[in-house]
Image (cartoon, rainbow, N blue to C red):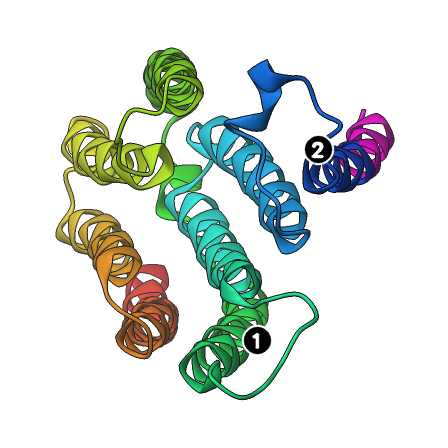
Amino acid sequence: MHKKISFFLVLFFLLSLIGIELNRQGLLPVAFQSFTPKNHFFAVQAAFTVVLILEVISLIFTIPCSFSRSVGKQFEILALILMRNAFKELSYFPEPITFLGNQQAILNILSDGFGALLIFGLLGYYYKIQALSAEDKMRPVDIYSFVAAKKGIAIILLAVFTFLGVNSVIATMTHQEHPDFLHSFYTILILTDILVVLLSQCFQPSFYAIFRNSGFALSTLIIRIALAAPPFFNVLLGIAAAVFAILLTIISRALFLKRSSKH
């Protein structure tokens, strides 16, 4: 399936380039000219948007997994969003590409690109030090009930994501102003994280589990703020969220897990 999707992305990118070129030459039907751009760099942005959508869908399927895995997936999406933002700046460049007059866009590309790279590195370290999640230590019957509840939440989220995506496509086709539906959905994910944290207290009432799960939810909240922040600040907030999640993991594993094992 992954190979088929990758092939589809390549085909989508090539067809986008062909459609843009046809529109530049005035060969597209009138019905398609209105929503087909004339800058080839828009094809790059469109391709990375599709990649991002696929990653968000995979994030939904990781919700039934541990908190740590779900948070890690959200950092993966943040890195992809920053990378997409870097390529998105290309759509403001003229063809052929020039340096003069585009200095701010170039600075934004450097900021988003290096920011994505730093978060990519921090994410690798986060996965490396990740301790065994607390919910893996629950009774089997509690694990089954907790995972079943999170699967139900994931199914509802998938339906909401599909609804927002279809509305966004319709608004784009009809030239209506609309916010980025991925950012809107990410707000819903933050509320979902808080819901899962509250739900986890039914199965993990200990202080350690509540604080750890709430801390991971807070890191995702910082990610959401990063998505709404302007260039430069979005990178700083993203790095802060990653460092927070890493410190939370190190402290919980080095101090509290050792203490609980002694008892």
Q: Quadrant of residue 120?
A: bottom right
Quadrant occupied by the C terminus: bottom left
**Left or right relative to 112: residue 232:** left
Q: Which mark is residue 26?
A: 2
Q: Which mark is residue 117?
A: 1
Spot occupied by residue 133 in the image (x, y as percentages of width and height): 42, 49
**Left or right relative to 20: residue 74:** left
Q: Amino acid at mark 2?
A: Gly
Spot occupied by residue 102 in the image (x, y as percentages of width and height): 48, 80
**Left or right relative to 6: residue 251:** left
Q: Amino acid at mark 1?
A: Leu
| Magenta region | 1-11
Spot occupied by residue 93 in the image (x, y as percentages of width and height): 55, 68
Quadrant occupied by the N terminus: top right
Q: Residue at x 77, y 29 (%)?
A: 5
Q: Residue at x 66, y 74 (%)?
A: 97
- Is 178 in the magenta? no
**Left or right relative to 77: residue 227:** left
Q: Residue at x 35, y 24 (%)?
A: 175
Q: Is residue 41 above or below residue 192?
A: below
Secondary structure category for the residue under label 2: loop
C-alpha separation, residue under disc 1 versus residue under disc 2: 40 Å
Q: Main secondary structure of the magenta part?
A: helix
